[in-house]
Image: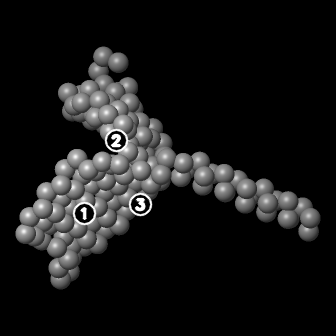
Amino acid sequence: MMLLAKVAIGVGTTLVAAGAYTMREGVIRIDVDEHRSGGSHVHFWVPAAAVPMALHLAPSRDLQQAAMQAGPYMPTLRTLTKELEKYPEATFVEVEGPDEHVRIQTHNGKLQIDVLDNGNTVHILCPLAIIKDISSELESYSPGS
């Protein structure tokens, strides 16, 4: 019985440590709601640390193609993420119309994009550190690196 308790404590501790490691970067959250008859409701949450790990599983040729297509924008993305970290709580774009509202801001070290258009809602929340990690990973696949 004592051996079973020790195994259970070991497994429980391992699960807590793995969960803490996985969630250390935060969560990427994408919510899309269509407010109409038969509309879609997509709510996608993924631990941000899982994205760079998933890139290691992607085929190299696909990452090379993505790096080639994103290549001209990578210096801009690198600079943007570096500068956004200086503004942890700032609203950069806010547009309001009769049936629409768009807001792009940083909040708690995350890039937040909210769109409300004719009753349809899109909400994206992504840690800035992950954007930086993904851009670094893509740069390593670009031709000439």
Q: Residue at x 19, y 70 (%)?
A: 120
Residue 36 seen anywhere in this rendered image of the structure: yes
For the N terminus, the quadrant is bottom right
- Asked whether 23 or 15 is in front, the reply is 23
Task: Say few, some or many: other residues with alpha carbon within 10 Å of mark 2 (under 14 / 14 to 19 / 20 or more).
Answer: some
Q: Is residue 15 above or below residue 130?
A: below
Q: Which residue is mark 3?
A: 45
Residue 70 place in picture, x, y as percent: 23, 33
* Alpha carbon distance from label 2 to label 3: 24 Å
Residue 106 place in picture, x, y as percent: 33, 48
* Alpha carbon distance from label 1 to label 2: 23 Å
Q: Is residue 3 above or below residue 59?
A: below
Q: Which residue is mark 1?
A: 122
| Mark 3: amino acid | Trp
Q: Which mark is residue 87?
A: 2
Of all residues, the one furthest to the right in this rendering is 2
